[in-house]
Amino acid sequence: MARFSLVVLCSGRGSNLQALIDASHSGTLPADVVAVCSDRPDCAALARARDAGIAVRAMRPRDFVDRAAFDRALFAEAAQFAPDLIVLAGFMRILDPAVVGQWRGRMINIHPSLLPKYPGLRTHERALDAGDAEHGASVHFVTAELDGGPVIAQVALPVLADDTPASLAARLLPLEHRLLVATTRLIVDGDIVLDGDHVVRNGRPLPAPLRLHADGELG
């Protein structure tokens, strides 16, 4: 029986991608990253993929007439690998709604805030400016609304008195890695699905996003 397959979309350094690769190799995540696609041909994430022997595809948005044309082309490349799930891991683009609709329920994104707080960019700075006592990250199903799809799971950490956007980001990053792997594992195992606009776990709608505990489990 073929293993569950993932295509990961990245724009930057690829640390969340690396977490998925490491979890796959260790057996923590019973799935294979079969390809990595990017809108930035020189990004570090592609180098990580090549080092791991994973297929890469990259193209530049400026080479296309508009956003929709680029998105169609990029997702056509991803579809060639017949992934069971597409994971957006630091993919810094707003996607065309038509493309998103084709992958509804089969595409997730990790975002560095406790959604619905702070969709978009500068999340750490915005949390500090607001005087939040806690910050965190969320994994959600992707819909046409920016960072607005149904949230599956979150991880939180306290905001310290001397935190800066950089220090907050650095403390959150390893928790993001654990959150993404744990959430993806639930989807791979068939425990989590999207039913309409609701996240369903083992046949029951989630009343609230799952939270990542210190032991690495979601509950």
Image (spheres, rainbow, N blue to C red):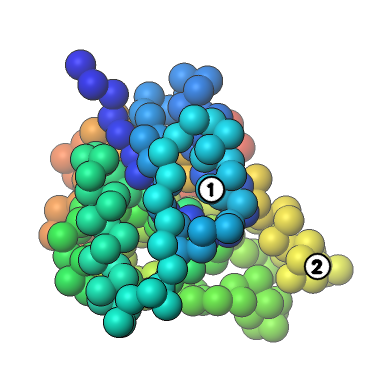
- Are the residues tagged 1 and 2 within 8 Å (C-beta)? no
Helix, strand or loop at label 2? It is loop
In the displayed structure, does residue 183 sit left or right of residue 44? left
Which disc, if any, is residue 46?
1
Find the distance from the CA under tag 1 to the CA under tag 2: 31 Å
Q: Residues within 10 Å of mark 1 (few under 14, many from 20)?
A: many
Amino acid residing under circle 2: Asp
Tell me which corner region of the image, top left, top right, bottom left or bottom right, holds residue 214.
top right
Q: How crowded is mark 2: few (under 14 residues within 10 Å), some or many (20 or more)?
A: some
Which of the image's four quarters has the C terminus?
Answer: top left
Q: Is residue 109 above or below residue 133?
A: above
Tell me which corner region of the image, top left, top right, bottom left or bottom right, holds residue 22.
top right
Q: Residue visible at 36% across and 28% down?
A: 31
Instruction: Please state which of residues 61 and 120 is positioned toward the viewer in this rendering.
Output: 61
Instruction: Please state which of residues 166 and 210 is positioned toward the viewer in this rendering.
Output: 166
Amino acid residing under circle 1: Leu
In the displayed structure, does residue 83 sit left or right of residue 51? left
Work out which residue is located at the far top of the displayed protein and give it: 1
Which of the image's four quarters has the N terminus?
Answer: top left
Work out which residue is located at the far right of the displayed protein and give it: 162
Q: Of the residues tagged 1 and 2, which is closer to the observer?
A: 1
Helix, strand or loop at label 1? It is helix
Q: Position of residue 24 (x, y in %)?
A: 46, 27
Which disc, if any, is residue 96?
none
Q: Is residue 190 above or below residue 131?
A: above
Q: Where is residue 2 in the image (x, y as percent from the top left)?
A: 23, 21
User: Which residue, given by chain and number where applicable, does mark 2 sit on?
Assistant: 163
